[in-house]
């Protein structure tokens, strides 16, 4: 378990401040954030190679804030691997190992053993990361901190390595905290996602919640939400007790029904809609449960593999729908085509 | 793209010529005295090596004391260099200033300061004397003077060599179970070894050429620089020239070692 409370640390002029979260034992945490958000500083402070200036780090329920890194039982893998260049691949893997058999086993499972005998300087970026992963796992840590460890691995190797890492994590009940810029990786691996911005924790939630219900417009945009509109929110239908009501969001000529509480009325608010939640049709259909039906015309279609990103002009705003390329051709969606966009009220996420 | 060949304007040509001329004047100022010395005394000096036991003894003394001073500094100065490179010391700026200060003190003044601190009449000097390490008129004094004037060169260069090794190598080693010192020994030491060796060679060369501080503490036994001065004042320029020329020729050895080490440091630098 990693338990961090009001953690602060400094790295040159950069400051990590007031970060609190709990990652249960055996869970896989994902750390997301733009460059200079404090992701690496957070990992280094948990590992103990960087001193905490405020707050507390607890591992496995024990306060380790003042313990040196060698007594924390935490493995770390940096983005640039930092393999020891004066040692061979085997010596790197065995550096901190107490059980040579296990070290050889983990090297074989991750694909590092085939690199034995190679000079570290001759390895590719991906190979270095594989060796660095094996080196970090060789001492059998129960907490592993990963700073974009798969970034330099080729796509096929990444899928295999991700699967092997997941298997090792389950086998060893590893608690993993993993910095990544790959939102797909975050969705498939993560139990908890942490979003950092400028040294502060913006949101901590399961990845699905983080992506669907980002805490702010800036967070939504960083997380790749295709549609973020600024406007005004007023109550539409009251809720009952704790159950939410519906809200009306207006931005220029666009009016959308979303779910929320009357207390959420704001003059400045944002509506966030994921592209995959927008359904397109060529004409109005029968009755539907969706509360938002918008008429518009296609302004752009960008196909990427099996998916397409269709931009629809709706009044004075543009709405992006992510649909399959097959649907684009079935509906004959070309620029200028008239379409009807349908969005459920529950897919309209209101934030400030 | 224009088909015209690039032609510098007259002002640019004049500036370039000025730069080249300035460099040539400085190089001439540095090189001419050395060449003159070697021309007048070079071969004679080498020939005299075989026939002049005093010169041989003084060269051995110089090399021996410079080696001891360098080894002592490597032993004591490497941990200090590591601390200065890696730790934010409470009085780090002050410590750095103390380390650099001997570089700025005129060397005879350094000799006087050493005499005041470690002379026979001082408690430190008396303590050293009881251990058989009197600093006046002894090899111990020569080592002390060499260490005082040349150790800052080693510590400064060693600090730079250590700082060039990314600290995250040590961070990784520590998460793999090493203490701070063990990580420095197992990882930073080998990765900075060439830079440390270059620093030691530079220090050795500086120590071997020291005169001002040594002559205040220990005129006898004579190191090579003192011997050349002694012969110059006692018997004139011609008598001193062979000794001086040998010193210049011997200085080429550490210079060449240093050049080759610096070249390999630049090539073998680990990725940061």
Image: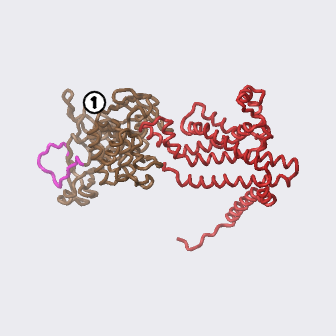
Chain colours: A brown, B red
Q: Which residues are magenta?
A: A276-292
The answer to whether residue A232 of the structure is visible from this angle is no
In the rendering, at what x and y percent does residue A48 appear? 43, 34
- Horizontal side of B234 relative to A10 (left or right) equals right
Picture coordinates of residue B230, whole percent (x, y) = 84, 46
Depth check, front residue: A55 or B206: B206
Residue B265, can we see it? yes
Considering the image in quadrants, where does the N terminus of chain A appear? top left
Residue positioned 30% across, 37% down in the render:
A174
User: Which residue of the protein is positioned furthest toward the right in this rendering?
Assistant: B235
Residue A344 point in image, percent of width and height: 20, 43
- Give the prevailing secondary structure in the magenta stretch: loop
- Is A179 displayed left or right of A163 in the figure? right
Residue A279 within the magenta-colored segment of the rendering: yes
Density class for disc 1 (Cα within 10 Å; few <14, some 14-19, many ≥20) is few
Q: Is residue B154 above or below residue A330?
A: above
Q: Quadrant of residue A98?
A: top left
Element carrying mark 1: helix
Q: Is residue A253 above or below residue B134?
A: below
Quadrant location of the C terminus of chain A in the rendered image: top left
Q: Chain of mark 1?
A: A
Confirm whether the magenta stretch covers residue B149.
no
Residue picked out by circle 1: A263
């Amino acid at each position: 378990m990693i338990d961090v409370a009001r953690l602060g640390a400094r790295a040159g002029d950069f400051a990590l401040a007031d970060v609190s979260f709990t990652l249960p034992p055996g869970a896989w945490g994902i750390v997301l954030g733009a460059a200079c958000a404090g992701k690496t500083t957070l990992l280094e402070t948990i590992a103990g190679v960087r001193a905490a200036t405020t707050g507390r780090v607890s591992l496995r329920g024990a306060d380790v804030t003042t313990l040196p890194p060698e007594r924390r039982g935490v493995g770390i893998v940096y983005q640039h691997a930092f393999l020891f260049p004066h040692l061979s691949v085997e010596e790197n893997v065995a550096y901190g190992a107490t059980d040579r058999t296990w070290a050889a086993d983990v090297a074989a499972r991750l694909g590092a053993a085939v690199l034995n005998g190679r000079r570290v300087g001759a390895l590719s970026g991906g190979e270095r990361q594989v060796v660095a992963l094996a080196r970090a796992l060789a001492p059998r840590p129960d907490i592993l901190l990963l700073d974009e460890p798969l970034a330099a691995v080729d796509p096929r190797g990444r899928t295999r390595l991700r699967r092997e890492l997941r298997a090792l994590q389950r086998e060893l009940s590893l608690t993993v905290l993993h910095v990544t810029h790959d939102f797909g990786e975050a969705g498939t691996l993560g139990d908890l996602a942490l979003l950092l911005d400028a040294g502060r924790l913006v949101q901590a939630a399961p990845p699905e919640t983080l992506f669907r219900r980002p805490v702010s417009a800036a967070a939504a945009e960083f997380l790749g939400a295709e549609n973020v509109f600024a406007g005004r929110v007023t109550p539409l239908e009251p809720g009952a007790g704790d159950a939410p009501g519906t809200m009306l969001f207006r931005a220029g000529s666009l009016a959308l029904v979303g779910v929320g509480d009357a207390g959420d009325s704001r003059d400045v608010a944002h509506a966030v809609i994921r592209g995959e939640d927008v359904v397109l049709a060529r004409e109005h259909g029968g009755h539907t449960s969706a509360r938002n039906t918008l008429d518009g015309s296609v302004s752009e279609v960008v196909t990427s593999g099996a998916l397409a990103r269709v931009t629809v002009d709706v009044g004075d705003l543009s709405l992006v729908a992510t649909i399959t390329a097959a649907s684009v051709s079935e509906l004959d969606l070309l620029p200028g085509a008239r379409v009807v966009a349908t969005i459920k009220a529950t897919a309209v996420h209101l934030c400030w | 793209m224009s088909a015209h060949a690039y032609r510098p304007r007259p002002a640019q040509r004049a500036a370039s010529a000025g730069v080249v001329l300035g460099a040539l004047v400085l190089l001439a100022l540095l090189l001419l005295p050395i060449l003159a010395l070697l021309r007048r005394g070079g071969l004679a000096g080498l020939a005299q090596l075989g026939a002049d036991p005093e010169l041989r003894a003084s060269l051995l003394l110089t090399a021996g004391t410079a080696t001891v001073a360098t080894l002592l500094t490597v032993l004591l100065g490497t941990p200090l260099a590591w601390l200065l490179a890696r730790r934010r010391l409470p009085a780090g700026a002050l410590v750095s200033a103390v380390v650099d200060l001997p570089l700025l003190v005129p060397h005879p003044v350094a000799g006087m300061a050493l005499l005041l601190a470690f002379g026979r009449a001082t408690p430190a000097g008396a303590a050293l004397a009881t251990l058989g390490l009197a600093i006046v008129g002894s090899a111990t004094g020569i080592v002390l003077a060499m260490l005082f004037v040349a150790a800052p060169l080693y510590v400064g260069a060693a600090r730079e060599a250590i700082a060039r090794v990314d600290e995250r190598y040590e961070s990784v080693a520590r998460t793999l179970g090493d203490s701070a010192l063990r990580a420095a020994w197992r990882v930073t030491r080998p990765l900075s070894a060439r830079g440390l060796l270059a620093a030691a060679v530079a220090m050795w060369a500086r120590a071997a050429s020291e005169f001002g501080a040594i002559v205040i503490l220990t005129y006898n036994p004579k190191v090579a620089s003192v011997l050349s001065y002694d012969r110059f004042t006692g018997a004139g320029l011609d008598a001193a020239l062979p000794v001086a020329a040998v010193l210049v020729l011997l200085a080429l050895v550490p210079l060449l070692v240093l050049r080759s080490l610096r070249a390999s440091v630049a090539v073998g630098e680990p990725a940061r």
